[in-house]
Image (cartoon, rainbow, N blue to C red):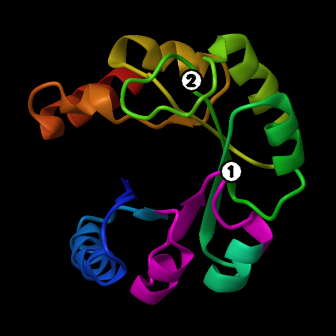
């Protein structure tokens, strides 16, 4: 699970992260903090995810240390090729399909690019996370294209999120 609160004040984000992390640990779930290396470090989160306009992976590593998970979002060939040399734990690519949740300013890349990126990333020992516009109907084809996992927001909010998560897990088994 990723915690992403773009507009939340730092103190409130840290407090909320600590509460969610406590519950997540009890459920044996992994929580990644989005954008905020300081919150990830101070809350003792297992990981951090950064984008193209956040801290660089090298700078993020200086804050969170060498052992935490570190992911990086990429959207173009140049970005994902550069990411292969960064100190990251996984490479995110997208938007695979059009996304209504997050406007990145980038066009949808499609499944063939997921395959290209996954092949290149796996040669460096990095899993690929596909992001952007992924629905339960598309998830299996995205995994089939080579992604190790998918990131989903809006499709989980169609009705009961817990039920929808279970449906995703079942579809991906």
User: 10 Å neighbourhood of mark 2: few (<14), some, or many (≥20)?
Assistant: many
Residue shown at 44% from the left, 22% from the top: 133
Precedes in sequence: disc 2 or disc 1: 1
In x, y percent, where is residue 130? 57, 32
The local secondary structure at tag 1 comes to loop
Closer to us: 127 or 158: 158
Q: Nearer the viewer, mark 2 or mark 1?
A: 1
Closer to us: 84 or 14: 14
Image: 72 above or below 47: above
Query: Given the current orientation, which residue lies at the most extreme bottom position?
Result: 42
List the residue tagged with mark 2: 143
In x, y percent, where is residue 103? 48, 32
**Residue 98 visible, this angle:** yes
Magenta-colored span: 34-58
Image: 139 above or below 16: above
**Residue 123 visible, this angle:** no
- Is residue 74 toward the left or the right of residue 48 in the image? right
In x, y percent, where is residue 84? 86, 48
In x, y percent, where is residue 163? 14, 33
* Quadrant in the picture for residue 45: bottom left
Residue shown at 24% from the left, 65% from the top: 27
Image: 112 above or below 169: above
Residue shown at 36% from the left, 79% from the top: 10
Name the disc covering residue 126, or none: none
List the residue tagged with mark 1: 52
Query: Given the current orientation, which residue lies at the most extreme left position?
Result: 160
Quadrant containing the N terminus in the rendered view = bottom left
């Amino acid at each position: 699970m990723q915690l992403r609160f773009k507009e939340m004040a730092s103190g409130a984000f840290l407090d909320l992260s600590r509460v969610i992390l406590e519950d997540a640990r009890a459920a044996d779930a992994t929580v990644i903090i989005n954008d905020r290396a300081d919150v990830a470090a101070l809350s003792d989160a297992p990981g951090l995810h950064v984008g193209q306009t956040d801290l660089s992976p090298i700078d993020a590593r200086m804050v969170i240390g060498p052992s935490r998970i570190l992911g990086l979002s990429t959207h173009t060939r140049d970005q994902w090729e550069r990411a292969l040399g960064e100190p990251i734990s996984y490479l995110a690519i997208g938007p695979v399909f059009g996304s209504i949740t997050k406007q990145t300013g980038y066009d949808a890349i499609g499944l063939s690019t997921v395959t290209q990126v996954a092949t290149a990333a796996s040669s460096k020992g990095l899993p690929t996370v596909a992001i952007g516009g992924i629905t339960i109907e598309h998830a299996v084809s995205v995994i089939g294209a080579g992604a190790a996992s998918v990131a989903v927001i809006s499709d989980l909010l169609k009705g009961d999120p817990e039920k929808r998560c279970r449906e995703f897990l079942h579809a991906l088994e």
